[in-house]
């Protein structure tokens, strides 16, 4: 009798402990859930060394509290961030009303985790420690909205996978800011590629002529929010910023997945790196000073200086196969854009019926322009199907767009200026989408596995380029 009673007692104790553990887990998850109530999301901004952190706050949001907690080291990065926030607060048209609470101790990251005054962290800055910051923040049960890239080396990639696993266990959301999904020509390219009567099916392509190509041209000297951009010196150190092949290429690899395999859950086994290459953009001391306001290179950049010129591995290209389809993503950094130009994007999707192309060159006035080119041997019905797809089907969702014939077997999609909101406005669109995900308590089923595949592709591409 005593033995039976003891067993019953132990079983009850174990059940009670197990039940208590479940209650704690449920309680922890409940704290991270959102209803959409006004101001229930409280932002903590960590070490905002890149201007993208400020662009998240270029607009205000009903769900987001106006008080933002900033944890960062004292210095130019923080001052630049605060200057941008202040410019949004004091602008004439639709001023914001952010109230920034700042902590600048050397233990800024540890202090953020200890105090935890917010439930969402925004991180956009020096990438050297970003993956570790993200992992520890997720472990603390805090949602993370992170600027790309969220990992810059193959060695750090397992930490990112771990962060996503822990985020799932804790019921928090880790999401990277993919602004280019909100660019109108990219949206329409994707929609047309899904129309079988127009596009047919995506070709397989070859290494020399991939089925889908994305190329992005960026510039070190540029204007942001109406002012010349001052870049931190560490931006030119690939150990801190990351090489171009793992930085801007993140956007291109993301778009390739998003367009070629919309809402398809991908895995690392779907990726086969064919080749990777990298090359430098060379900056003179005068160029470096123009964008950093520094008279000399910091010590950590001396490793990249040859005969007084700094050589930055900001350019990169990956050719790879995704589910058997050849793709190419390449990024080029120039010092400064031609007059009237800015960052540019080129893209082509090769279908069995037609190619859908985005160009942004001199002929287009440096504005992204969408073209459709009939493929050799395409049917005579293509023009009728394309006209219906644009002037009827897509017009229902995007009133005002129109198909314009340019030449035999070549058309342009005319897009009203109202849809060209610009790169900076895309940060508001991404943030609004993320807030909806917080309210839903989940990301779309394909997002996390595809983020993992995206960063696997970029880091493995870097590994191939370094061989």
Image (spheres, rainbow, N blue to C red):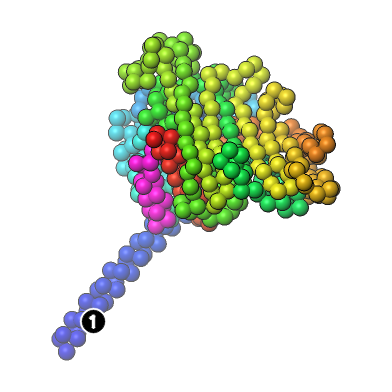
When asked about the image quadrant of residue 338, the answer is top right
Local packing at callout 1 (Cα closer than 10 Å; few below 14, some 14-19, many 20+) is few
Q: Which residues are magenta?
A: 146-170
Left or right, 327 with respect to 50, comes to right
Residue 285 seen anywhere in this rendered image of the structure? yes
Work out whether residue 338 or residue 325 is closer to the camera in this orientation and state it: 325
Camera-side residue of 313 and 299: 313
**Residue placed under numbered mark 1 in the picture:** 8
In this rendering, position of residue 133 left or right of residue 176:
left
Return the x and y of residue 459 as percentages of the image width and height.
43, 40
In the picture, which quadrant includes the C terminus? top left
Is 311 magenta? The answer is no
Q: In the rendered image of this protein, does residue 98 appear above or below residue 191?
A: above
Residue 130 visible in the picture = no
Q: Residue at x 62, y 32 (%)?
A: 345
Picture coordinates of residue 196 (x, y %)?
72, 53
Residue at x 57% of width, y 48% of height? 325
Residue 110 is drawn in which quadrant? top left
Q: Specify the farthest residue to the bottom.
A: 1
- Taking the spot 35% from the left edge, 65% from the top edge, the residue there is 22
């Amino acid at each position: 009798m005593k033995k039976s009673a003891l067993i019953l007692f132990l079983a009850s104790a174990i059940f009670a402990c197990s039940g208590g553990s479940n209650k704690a887990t449920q309680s922890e998850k409940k704290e991270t859930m959102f209803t959409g109530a006004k101001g229930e999301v409280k932002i903590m901004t960590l070490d905002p060394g890149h201007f993208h952190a400020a662009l998240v706050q270029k607009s205000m949001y009903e769900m987001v509290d106006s008080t933002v907690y900033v944890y960062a080291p004292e210095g130019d990065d923080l001052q630049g961030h605060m200057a941008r926030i202040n410019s949004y607060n004091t602008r004439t048209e639709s001023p914001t009303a952010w109230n920034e609470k700042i902590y600048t101790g050397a233990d800024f990251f540890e202090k953020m985790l200890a105090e935890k005054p917010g439930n969402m962290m925004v991180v956009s800055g020096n990438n050297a420690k970003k993956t570790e910051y993200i992992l520890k923040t997720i472990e603390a049960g805090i949602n993370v909205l992170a600027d790309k890239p969220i990992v810059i080396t193959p060695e750090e990639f397992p930490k990112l996978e771990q962060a996503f696993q822990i985020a799932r266990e804790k019921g928090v959301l880790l999401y990277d800011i993919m602004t280019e999904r909100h660019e109108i020509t990219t949206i329409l390219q994707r929609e047309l590629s899904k129309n079988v009567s127009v596009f047919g099916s995506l070709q397989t392509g070859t290494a020399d002529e991939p089925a889908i190509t994305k190329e992005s041209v960026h510039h070190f000297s540029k204007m942001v929010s109406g002012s010349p951009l001052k870049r931190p010196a560490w931006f030119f150190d690939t150990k801190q910023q990351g090489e171009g092949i793992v930085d801007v290429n993140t956007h291109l690899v993301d778009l390739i997945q998003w367009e070629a395999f919309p809402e398809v859950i991908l895995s690392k086994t779907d990726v086969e790196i064919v080749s990777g290459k990298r090359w430098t953009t060379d900056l003179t001391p005068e160029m470096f000073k123009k964008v950093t306001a520094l008279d000399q290179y910091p010590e950590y950049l001396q490793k990249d200086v040859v005969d007084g010129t700094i050589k930055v591995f900001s350019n990169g290209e990956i050719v790879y196969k995704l589910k058997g389809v050849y793709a190419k993503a390449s990024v080029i950094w120039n010092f400064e854009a031609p007059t009237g130009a800015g960052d540019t994007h080129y893209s082509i999707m090769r279908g069995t019926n037609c190619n859908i192309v985005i160009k942004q060159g001199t002929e287009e006035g440096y504005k992204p322009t969408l073209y459709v080119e009939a493929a050799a041997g395409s049917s005579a019905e293509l023009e009728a199907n394309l006209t219906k797809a644009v002037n009827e089907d897509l017009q229902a969702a995007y009133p005002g767009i129109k198909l314009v014939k340019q030449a035999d077997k070549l058309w342009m999609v005319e897009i009203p200026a109202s849809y060209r909101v610009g790169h900076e406005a895309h940060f508001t669109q991404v943030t609004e989408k993320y807030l909806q995900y917080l309210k839903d308590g989940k990301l779309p089923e394909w997002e996390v596995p595809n983020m993992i595949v995206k960063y696997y592709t970029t880091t493995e591409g870097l590994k191939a380029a370094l061989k």
